[in-house]
Image: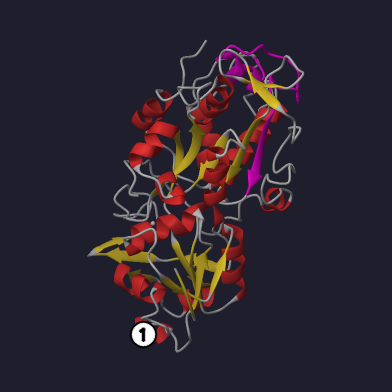
């Protein structure tokens, strides 16, 4: 094997985790571009490549237009299912009567969707909270949103360089950009929209052969090249095929930070892959593999294992005494959407960005864009803390 050179979260709600659930958004992932450098469109809607300028309030305006610019985001394949689904709903601007996308059949309220009462279309409602004029038209929001898929490192670089409004990251920006916490606080606002338990998975054949649980020390040994055969950890006599995420991936950064103790810790892996769905496919295609990826990408042909950390066994079962949904689970991590502090936006988040981000920080948003894509919702106290990072509503 070749030598290549993971932050504990606060309290989280438990939710049902189906190990047999299908991978998130395979078709949607296939339909997006890898990054925004070529000006291509990575998500729903938008008019990639248009020039923009700022008005007096710090909101970005399309050049030559009186309307607000498209909100752009790029980065983590882990955060992508949340961000892209939100973007799709936003750009659809579905009416409150559309129970499939926004509310219920009751046109006067969004019953069961977080106590929101409105007869407005979805983007009209959330944009209106920040002073934008509603259009009242399906598929015509007050401004569009666009999400591109790459990975956490490039998402953080893109927001740093002013190429996008929001940098999606499953790892802390301090590690992704190699900056201090002081530099982070001076230049960025960290919007946490959900959490991920980050399980460790093995091929179905390995799980069926008895490897249903490993210790943290055994996993560290596998990823540092000290354990190379499954028989060394109670499995069959097969060489371990070790799968890692690409360097610069937030999933890789978080795994090394939380499992190995250092975001730059060396690892011994057989292959590195850029996105979660690629790890999933390799584990499905091989009968001797181990890998780490986001909760949302569980599927058939692979199994999440229980992990014993210093005598406490965390299981991928929400009904167990200790689960990967617990805040104490060492691989639990925040999912971030970063915005940049500039002279035009000294608060770090303009009204467009705030309107879009606020949608995720509601009971409706947590249910629809976090829980429904197999991630862990934020507790109420954390949602309130995240809302305080946004500018005041109009």
Q: Residue at x 36, y 85 (%)?
A: 232
Q: Is residue 125 magenta?
A: yes
Q: Residue furthest bottom?
A: 237
Residue 367 visible in the shown view = yes
Q: Kindly indicate the quadrant of the structure image that contains residue 70.
A: top right
231 or 7: nearer the eye? 7
195 or 257: nearer the eye? 257
Residue 186 position, x and y percent, is 39, 32
Q: Residue at x 42, y 83 (%)?
A: 228
29 to 311, vertically: above or below: above
Colour scheme of this structure image?
Answer: secondary structure
369 or 265: nearer the eye? 265
Residue 84 position, x and y percent, is 63, 40
Left or right, 382 with reference to 203 = left
252 or 236: nearer the eye? 252
Main SS class of the magenta portion in the image = loop
Residue 337 position, x and y percent, is 50, 38
Q: Is residue 100 magenta?
A: no
Residue 269 position, x and y percent, is 48, 74
Q: Which residues are magenta?
A: 120-149
Left or right, 181 with reference to 132 = left
Q: Residue at x 50, y 27 (%)?
A: 342
Q: Kindly indicate the quadrant of the structure image that contains residue 13.
A: top left
What residue is shown with label 1? 232
């Amino acid at each position: 094997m070749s030598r290549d050179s993971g932050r504990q979260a606060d309290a989280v709600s438990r939710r049902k985790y189906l190990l047999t659930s299908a991978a998130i958004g395979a078709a949607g992932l296939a339909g997006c571009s890898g990054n925004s450098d070529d000006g291509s469109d990575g998500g729903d809607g938008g008019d990639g490549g248009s020039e923009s300028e700022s008005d007096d309030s710090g909101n970005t305006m399309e050049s030559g237009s009186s309307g607000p610019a498209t909100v752009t985001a790029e980065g983590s394949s882990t955060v992508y299912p949340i961000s892209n689904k939100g973007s799709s709903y936003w750009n659809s601007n579905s009416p409150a009567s559309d129970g499939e996308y926004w509310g219920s059949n009751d046109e006067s309220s969004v019953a069961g969707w977080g106590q929101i009462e409105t007869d407005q279309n979805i983007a009209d409602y959330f944009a209106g909270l920040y002073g934008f004029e509603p259009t009242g038209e399906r598929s015509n929001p007050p401004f569009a949103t666009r999400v591109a898929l790459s990975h956490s490192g490039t998402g953080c670089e893109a927001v740093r360089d002013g190429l996008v409004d929001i940098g999606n990251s499953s790892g802390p920006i301090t590690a992704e950009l190699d900056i201090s916490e002081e530099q982070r606080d001076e230049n960025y606002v960290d919007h946490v929209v959900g959490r991920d338990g980050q399980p460790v998975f093995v091929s179905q054949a390995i799980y069926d052969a008895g490897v249903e649980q490993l210790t943290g020390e055994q996993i560290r040994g596998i990823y540092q090249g000290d354990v190379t055969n499954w028989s060394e950890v109670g499995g069959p006599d097969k060489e371990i095929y070790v799968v890692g995420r690409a360097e610069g991936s937030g999933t890789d950064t978080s795994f090394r930070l939380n499992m190995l103790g250092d975001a730059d810790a060396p690892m011994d892996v057989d292959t590195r892959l850029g996105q979660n769905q690629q790890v999933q496919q390799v584990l499905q295609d091989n009968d001797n593999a181990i890998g780490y990826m986001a909760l949302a990408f569980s599927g058939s042909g692979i199994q999440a294992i229980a992990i014993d950390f210093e005598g406490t066994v965390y299981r991928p079962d929400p009904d167990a005494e200790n689960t990967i949904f617990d805040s104490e689970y060492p691989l639990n991590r925040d999912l971030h959407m970063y915005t940049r502090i500039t002279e035009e936006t000294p608060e770090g988040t303009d009204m467009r960005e705030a309107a879009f981000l606020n949608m995720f920080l509601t009971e409706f948003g947590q249910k629809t864009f976090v829980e429904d894509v197999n991630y862990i919702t934020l507790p109420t106290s954390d949602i309130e803390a995240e809302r305080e990072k946004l500018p005041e509503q109009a």
